[in-house]
Image (cartoon, rainbow, N blue to C red):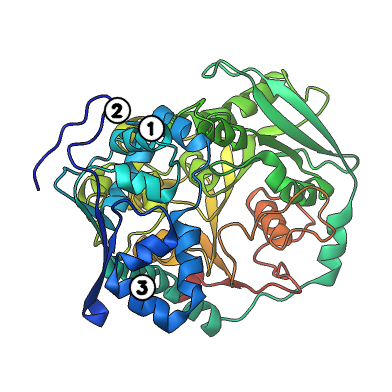
Amino acid sequence: MAGLALTGVGTPASALERLVLRMPFLETSITINLGEAETVDQLLRSSPDLEDLRAASGDRLSNLLEGIFLAPLPPETRSFLEGSTGQPLLEQVLQSAVALVQLEGVEADTSGRMLTDALIRAERNGEATVLGLLREMPGETATIDISRVAFIASRLIRNTEQGRSLVKAAPVEPFNSSLQARLRGAWSRREIQVSVPHRQEPLRTLVLEPQRNSNGRLAVISHGLWDDPESFEGWGEVLASAGYTVLLPDHPGSDFEQQKAMLSGDRPPPDPEELTRRPRDVSALIDAVASGRILRNQSLNTDAVAAIGHSWGGTTVLQLAGADPTDRKMLSRCSDLEDPEGNMSWVLQCSWLSTIREAGAADPRVRAVVSVSPPLRLLFDPASSRSLSGKVLLISGTADWVVPSGPEAISPMRETKAARHGHRLVLYERANHFTPRSFRGDPQPAAIGALLLAWLNEQLDVSGSVTFSGGGWGDPEQRLVDVSDRL
């Protein structure tokens, strides 16, 4: 394909005229002539293929196309693209899109500039819709290979099959009603601001403290990308009820507020440097407790701390435990769009490539680790699982299509023989990426709350309490299965 340099926001050398949907499995293609069509009827009349489909489907096809092509683009789209152009995370997203949509006559642009310029032209013409954007893209024909969509969907299904099979073949952890009754103790809640040396702004941190019977143990919970501490207060409430003091930091470079600012065009996507800053957030909080800058009225053991995280937060706590980041797998696999283990989380993982060599963040004070749905396949050296500072409980949902259990949990645990070193994998049946979250004041304790408590108690030698090996940490409604010895 010939290259086309875009400068400014002038009219492209040739505006997109045709959209071709290739369906190799049906041995056919449908061509949609964009041209000057402004209504769905005009689009249908311009394409004999679509006319035939409309005749067969009545108004349903017209309604579908109208919803797709004439949908107005959110006003924030332009600001988001302009503020994100050239950022690694956006480039990874667009690189994946290039595999689905091919523009004939132009070079693939994964910076976001081509898309931004087309949107500006569409806005100038009063056509800030999907159809208006398509008509302003350079080139003559855009081809969408529907078989690529089918390939990606099939790969996602394959990447969750192992987890579903393992759950069916293994016994479900039983439910201990007396344990659940213990998850309703009293705690207090407050919010503090903690200055840290590696950020300009202080860390907003939620503090949950047991009102009685403190066990002197500290637990830190790290949220995922574009999330916030409030999404995991249910976890913290369970732990605080059992005597733990819990800190939930708000990672400002990748939290919910950052997402809102990014979509408004005020901030770019998360910087790859966040891979190094997030674990430093946690270590800085432990430092603040150890030095007495915060929680000075408590006697807490900061030499044996628990770290819990969800999604990117799960990656963060693995870094703290001493998992060794390496670029070896990223260099060989990020560019392979046919990789059988490829999944949505690789978009994020591959955006970390530029900082991965500085991402080691081991903190020997972290002695108990729970990592829920973490992106990790491309990031860590498998050999480092043998020398972590704490034992890791990995939790993965069998219906998680964002971070599927096959490549991101089962394969790493199997290849490293992690169970031999004391690490465990629990699968949460039918849970998607966000199911494990538990919010403040949820009427029922978090489904994995007893599991979190059992693991931390066992790893931190909290005497007289429920433990992971003692069992009973299941849930009455959700199926939780320890598959570690079946990998």
> What's the CA distance linking mark 3 and mark 2?
39 Å
User: Element type at marker 2?
Assistant: loop
Seen at 75% across and 61% down, the residue is 466
**Is residue 8 visible in the rendered structure shown here?**
yes
Question: Which mark sits nearer the N-terminus, 3 or 2?
Answer: 2
Seen at 66% across and 22% down, the residue is 288
In the image, taking residue 228 as reference, residue 392 lies left or right, namely: left
The percent position of residue 272, horizontal first and vertical second, equals 39, 32
Density class for disc 1 (Cα within 10 Å; few <14, some 14-19, many ≥20) is some
Type of amino acid at the residue the image marks with label 1:
Ile
Quarter occupied by residue 102: bottom left
Type of amino acid at the residue the image marks with label 3:
Ser
3 or 2: mark nearer the eye: 2
The percent position of residue 26, horizontal first and vertical second, equals 26, 81
> What's the CA distance linking mark 2 and mark 1?
7 Å
Type of amino acid at the residue the image marks with label 2:
Val
3 or 1: mark nearer the eye: 1
> Which label sits on residue 9?
2
Density class for disc 2 (Cα within 10 Å; few <14, some 14-19, many ≥20) is some
The percent position of residue 350, horizontal first and vertical second, equals 33, 44
Seen at 34% across and 72% down, the residue is 50
Q: Which residue is mark 3?
A: 154
The residue lying toward the viewer, choosing from 357 and 69, is 69
> Which label sits on residue 120?
1
User: Element type at marker 1?
Assistant: helix
The residue lying toward the viewer, choosing from 433 and 424, is 433
The percent position of residue 338, horizontal first and vertical second, equals 24, 62
Up the image or down, 358 lies above or below 412; here it is above
